[in-house]
Image (cartoon, coloured by chain):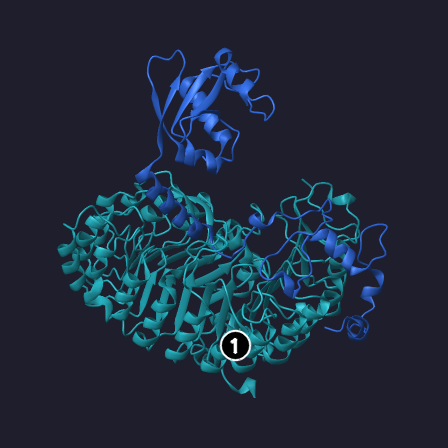
Amino acid sequence: MTQSFPEEVLEHVFSFLTSHTDRNAVSLVSKSWYDTERWCRDHVFIGNCYAVNPRVLTRRFKEVKAVELKGKPHFADFNLVPEGWGGCVDPWIVEMGRVYSGLEEIRLKRMEVTDEGLEMVAKGFGKLKVLVLASCDGFSTDGLAAVAANCRNLRVLDLRECEVEELSCHWLSHFPDSFTLLESLNIACLSSEVSFSALERLVSRSPNLKTLKLNRTVPLEKLSTLLQRAPQLVEFGTGAYSAEGLDAYSSLAEAFSGCKKLKSLSGFWDVIPAYLPAVYSVCSQLTSLNLSYATTQSPDLSKIISHCHNLQRLVVLDYIEDTGLETVATSCKDLKELVVFPSDPYVADANVPLTEQGLVSVSQGCTKLHSVLYFCRQMSNSALVSISKNRPNITCFRLCILEPRSPDYLTLEPLDTGFGSIVENCKQLTRLSMSGLLTDRVFEYIGKHAKKLDMLSIAFAGDTDLGLHYILSGCDSLRKLEIRDCPFGDKALLANASKLETMRSLWMSSCFVSFGACKLLGQKMPRLNVEVIDERENLNSIPENVPVEKVYIYRTVCGQRFDMPDFVRIMGKDKADVYNLS
Amino acid sequence: MDQTRSTLDLFNNVDLTTELRLGLPGSDGKPENVKSSLSGNKRTSSEMGSSSCTDENESRYSPPTKEQVVGWPPVRSYRKNILQVKKTESEMGSGMYVKVSMDGAPYLRKLDLKMYQSYEELIKGLQVMFKCVIGLYSEREGYNGSQHVPTYEDKDGDWMLVGDVPWEMFISSCKRLRIMKSCEARGLGEFV
């Protein structure tokens, strides 16, 4: 039947498929569908840059307009991946520059980006419209200057949570005076000053600017100037939200009231509560509010939130307290996503009145809530059960109880039943992060119920290999599994080796997976890279039955990579293992 | 959590596991040995409550201390820094300036104790400020061997040797600093 459709018809049908998973599925139907699909796919997503390589990309897809690449494993965000591990984007840029002259969008996450790479981007992709660098590092303001100077078609420059070497404040001035296309600029991650006059001129000549996220160094006094130049803004991130005296207040309030399209606010470093009411005029428009740098007390936070009746996304510190979350529960009936970060993560008893009760309140009052990231100091099974029954529509549940292995604070039991209830009631759950005292039983529940679970993060949990076995054998949709400090070893891993090929990746650190098991796994599974990441000296003399520090296992069609530092070994790929030759 | 039924029954179609055993050389390969010597963390029990303690038999693969568990809690580093910056800024507002005199120097200096986290840093700072060498502290000998001895006046008005009490106690009780010449400072040591 597939032969009866001319290619043009198939292509036309495929053009309605935008999700890459759909396109991947379609390409598996038959050889001709695969061929048709590859000629017309123009948005490519690569979730693990080492699963393929640049040549594989350019051989398969010929006219790519947008590429998205991810590099380091997620736990790199928490410093668990040593510096120099890999994920450098330069080889990709070289190869794509050779083939995809029409490339318009580059989105990178957790990749190492160099100034040379940015220069290649700037000079090689004349049609580039979108450059999003999320959690990337390795580059400086020089690279940004090259992008500013050369990317004549740039619409979006988004430096999301990057680490940038800030050599100069003048890189913004490299946008030519004739450049007026900017739609989105996010420089919130920069810690040094940028030239304000360059910024102001840039904003003034960008009538399509919808997103502007400033960094901390832009003073509050300058905000009204910027807002007056860009009243069409939809997303705005302030700088430090404090000033001496209140002189700047009325012009700021007036400037905010002029922003009729504003839907998202963030920034608010060093907040002076007296200035918060300046945003009241836009609160009812807001769908997204990020106060996670606002180190101010609950009453101030509650006041502003109580005005935000249309809020869908709230990010806040635990200064909000349980009482503030009750305000959220009553005021923000459209809330879909709640994130509560800890203000003092390293202090044992920080005495902040934010408990499990806050989350329970929100789960009761906000019927559309589906995504939660919550840091707190105590939790109970009964609270978790309530949350799961209140909100069976939760799809992403990430709970971090600050002290590892904390039991139910009421009963001192493990939190197995609580999390079990989450996976049992929230049938659409795709992402779960757990904490607290957890035994193998919770993994039994997860394996049994969490059939849609895509990503699971585990720390300081479980008793035996059974725990890991339940997960690997039960979670049918699992693609990303990251584990730290759990007593999981070789048996479950080896027994479920074939499962690993159905997943994007598995990370295990400070567990009990031995060198020998890694080697064996690498030998038996040619389409898996079993990367042992271990910074100890004299690795060659460590016996095979000793656990590795970290192992990162991912499926790949390319075999081993050749850019590994000396603390990374891909195990089992040849008789004597693969050692870095430098 | 019935371990006995677990491993053998469930993994019986895998021949891979027979080639491997857990355990350090010389051990009998029981998981418990490896666990206790490698992670340093006790198996959890309800009595432990919410504190985790390191195991007695730390091995050569000993883990970091509780305070230094890398990457926990899972908060991005730029998020940690925000609050610390905020803290030091608010503390700098109040400052903790004390006068510092050095025997033989024509004028006094002022120094913000809050800029330092430890005696080591303070001594380094003093050495830089006064271009002198103070050397290392020892409980028995004080600053024996160096030309200059750092002392401080505490809340009770007594002159004390810098380094005897814990740092936190020191900065809360130190009113002023004096760098004495060691020949004069010998008197202090005799009465301690």
Of the pair A505 and B186, the residue shown nearer to us: B186
Residue that mark 1 sits on: A382
- Residue A511 placed where, x, y %? 68, 58
Tell me the quarter of the image containing the C terminus of chain B.
Answer: top right
Query: Would you place residue A471 above or below residue B70 in this image?
Result: below
**Which corner quadrant of the image does residue A462 belong to?**
bottom right
Q: Residue at x 54, y 15 (%)?
A: B146
- Residue A448 placed where, x, y %? 64, 80
| Residue A373 visible from this viewpoint | yes
Image-based side of A160 in relation to A566, left or right: left
**In the rendered structure, which amino acid carries the disc numbered 1?**
Ser
- Residue A384 placed where, x, y %? 51, 75
**Which corner quadrant of the image does residue A535 belong to?**
top right
Image-based side of A292 in relation to A524, left or right: left
Image-based side of B30 in relation to A28, left or right: right
Image-based side of A425 in relation to A104, left or right: right
Question: Please, what secondary structure does the residue beneath circle 1 have?
Answer: helix
Of the pair B152 and A180, the residue shown nearer to us: B152
Query: Would you place residue A541 above or below residue A232 in this image?
Result: above
- Chain containing mark 1: A
Q: Which residue is drawn at 35% across and 41% down?
A: B91
Callout 1 crowding tier (Cα within 10 Å): few <14, some 14–19, many ≥20: some
Colour for chain A in the figure: cyan
- Residue A89 placed where, x, y %? 50, 52
Q: Which chain is blue?
A: B
